[in-house]
């Protein structure tokens, strides 16, 4: 009975009964393993690609935030100068709206046409980093914020944590329609970061620039530009 049942099943599916009891051959096994291996490698490659792209997106998001913060730092310095101009009196009332921003400043004169580095702590105290010419320093993360502050716990020890980001703030005086160059400044903030080598990109330094244009590489650079005006001084002159 069992023999007839097997023959009936084989005839229904048009398959010789002798093939029903065959095992895998070595060639079939090798082909199956090869296909499975290719599928696994493809899946891992896709995950690697997703990891690289996710990391790049995170770096770009951080750089965008740091570029916007750079613009806000310059605005804050300008607004603080305006406040000092409003509240000062007597012979000490010699503040200018570009103190700490350009060579035209009185209380702090600095040339940022080639780039400066500053953070939100600028001018806040002795241990805080002042506005300084750009020297290619990396921003720190020692305090949980991106700044240039280096906390010193005791002699010979520092808890400084260096990030992968650099920020250059370039300030250029602009001549207005009246031929004056002390009412408008152009602000450009460049944030660059070191990009590690991966299957998509080689190692890219934060200082790398296009040899033809002099601009930083868009692969690891975010730039923000804006124009600030001195309405306060213009109205009062």
Image (cartoon, rainbow, N blue to C red):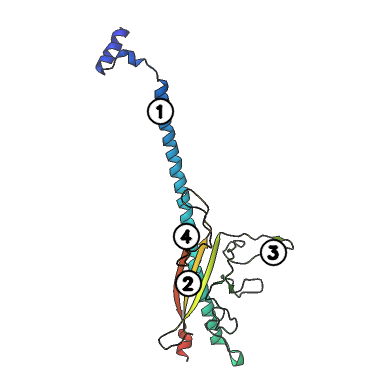
Q: Earlier in the sequence, mark 1 or mark 2?
A: 1
Q: Residue furthest top?
A: 1
Residue at horizontal 51%, vertical 73%? Answer: 170
The local crowd at label 1, few if under 14, some if 14 to 19, many if 20 or more residues have their Cα within 10 Å, is few
Residue 98: mark in rendering:
none
Q: Earlier in the sequence, mark 2 or mark 4?
A: 4
**Residue at the spot of label 4:** 61
- Mark 1 touching mark 2, by CB under 8 A? no
Which badge, 3 or 2, comes first in the chain's sequence? 3
Label 4: element kind? helix
The residue to which callout 1 is attached is 32
Q: Residues within 10 Å of mark 4 (few under 14, many from 20)?
A: few
Q: Could you tell me how far apart the alpha carbons at marks 1 and 4 are, in whole angstroms?
A: 44 Å
Q: Is residue 157 above or below residue 130?
A: above
Q: Earlier in the sequence, mark 1 or mark 4?
A: 1
Res. 63 visible in picture: yes
Q: Are marks 3 and 2 in contact (CB under 8 Å)?
A: no
Disc 2: which residue: 188
Reply above or below: 233 against 122: below
CA distance separating discs 2 and 4: 18 Å
Quadrant location, the N terminus: top left
Q: Earlier in the sequence, mark 3 or mark 4?
A: 4
Q: Residue 125 at what x, y percent from top left?
A: 64, 74
Q: Nearer the viewer, mark 3 or mark 2?
A: 2
Q: Residues within 10 Å of mark 3 (few under 14, many from 20)?
A: few
The nearer-to-camera label among 2 and 4 is 2
Residue for point 42% across, 26% down: 30
Earlier-in-chain disc, 1 versus 3? 1
* Figure label count: 4
Q: Write down the residue under mark 3.
A: 152
CB within 8 Å, label 1 to label 4: no
């Amino acid at each position: 009975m069992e023999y007839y049942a097997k023959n009936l099943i084989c005839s229904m599916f048009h398959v010789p009964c002798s093939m029903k009891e065959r095992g895998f051959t070595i060639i079939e096994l090798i082909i199956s393993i090869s296909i499975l291996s290719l599928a696994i490698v493809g899946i891992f490659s896709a995950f690697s690609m997703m990891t690289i792209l996710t990391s790049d997106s995170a770096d770009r998001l951080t750089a965008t935030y740091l570029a916007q913060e750079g613009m806000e730092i310059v605005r804050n310095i300008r607004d603080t100068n305006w406040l000092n101009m409003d509240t000062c009196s007597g012979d000490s009332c010699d503040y200018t709206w570009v103190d700490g921003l350009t060579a035209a400043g009185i209380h702090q004169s600095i040339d940022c046409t080639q780039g400066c580095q500053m953070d939100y702590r600028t001018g806040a105290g002795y241990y805080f980093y002042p506005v300084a010419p750009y020297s290619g320093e990396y921003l720190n993360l020692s305090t949980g914020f991106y700044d240039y502050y280096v906390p010193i716990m005791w002699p010979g020890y520092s808890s400084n944590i260096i990030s992968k980001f650099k920020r250059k703030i370039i300030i250029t005086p602009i001549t207005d329609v009246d031929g004056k160059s002390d009412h408008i400044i152009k602000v450009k903030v460049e944030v660059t970061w070191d990009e590690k080598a991966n299957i998509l990109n080689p190692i890219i330094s934060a200082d790398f620039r296009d040899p033809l244009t002099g601009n930083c590489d868009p692969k690891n650079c975010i730039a923000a530009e804006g124009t600030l005006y001195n309405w306060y001084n213009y109205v009062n002159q």
